[in-house]
Amino acid sequence: MTEPLRLVVFDVDGTLVDSQADIVASMTRSFQAVGHPIPARDAVLGIVGLSLDVAMERLAPGLDDRDYQEMVDAYRLAYTELRRAKGSMESSPLYPGAREALEAVAARPSTLLGVATGKSRRGLDLLIEGHGLVGTFTTMQVSDLHPSKPDPSMLLAALSETGVEPGDAVMVGDTTYDMEMARAAGVAGLGVAWGYHQAERLAEAGARRVLSGFEDLPAALDDLWEATR
């Protein structure tokens, strides 16, 4: 029997790369730009994965639109400066096993890779180039073109672009936003335990399984595919 075309979509920050230091530093700069009290580190990491405009409103409710825009602009400038100063390999290093996992999944017959991230397209392109991953992902969905997670728009677009059925797709992510997005799109969700939301929260949000390391991904995919046969 011919294997169906399958799609594995990855979140980026907190899933493929550890960018928390630059995220916290950039968020600090954004709050300083408008003179607003800087949120706690845990609060900042808790909104990673959301689009910046939504994240700012979550962290600082009640400000006006001009303040939010200034904060978004300040964040992007700070993040760009940090990445330029350190380079992607240091600024946002891949988690252990990430590159090997991407290569292993990409080598599977009839399996495509994708990305669904709260990053901008420019930011994602620079990250992918910096890590030598150009050409790895068939579909790349970013915040410029979609509502923030957990809206299913990113995954629905990824499915449409690749022609993959929802039942043959998987979303791999570290936050409840990823799992909720997957559920809303009719896609299976796999959580990762090394990111910014706790494993218990991921399970409650619908994760079929929470991976303790990238080495667990191949077996988790096999289990999911077997269940859909």
Image: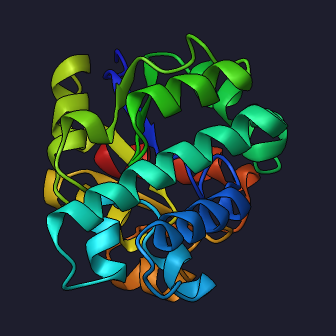
Residue 29 drawn above or below residue 97: below
Residue 210 drawn above or below residue 185: below
Left or right, 186 with respect to 96, comes to left
User: If the image is split into quadrants, where does the N terminus sit?
Assistant: top left
Q: Nearer the viewer, residue 97 or 73?
A: 73
Residue 178 locus on image (x, y percent): 36, 60
Q: Answer with the quarter of the image where residue 163 lies.
A: top left
Q: Answer with the quarter of the image where residue 82 lies.
A: top right
The residue drawn where x is 59% and y is 54% is 15
Residue 100 drawn above or below residue 65: above
The residue drawn where x is 31% and y is 23% is 4
Left or right, 31 with respect to 184, comes to right
The residue drawn where x is 58% and y is 86% is 42
Residue 11 locus on image (x, y percent): 47, 48
User: If the image is split into quadrants, where does the C terminus sit?
Assistant: top left
Residue 110 locus on image (x, y percent): 43, 16
Q: Nearer the viewer, residue 221 or 71?
A: 71
The residue drawn where x is 62% and y is 30% is 127
State whether residue 94 appears in this view.
Answer: no
Residue 118 locus on image (x, y percent): 38, 49
How many circles with numbers are drawn on the protein?
Answer: 0
Left or right, 6 with respect to 85, comes to left
Q: Nearer the viewer, residue 140 or 120?
A: 120
Report the residue that reaches farthest toward the top.
135
Residue 82 drawn above or below residue 72: above
State whether residue 22 appears in this view.
Answer: yes
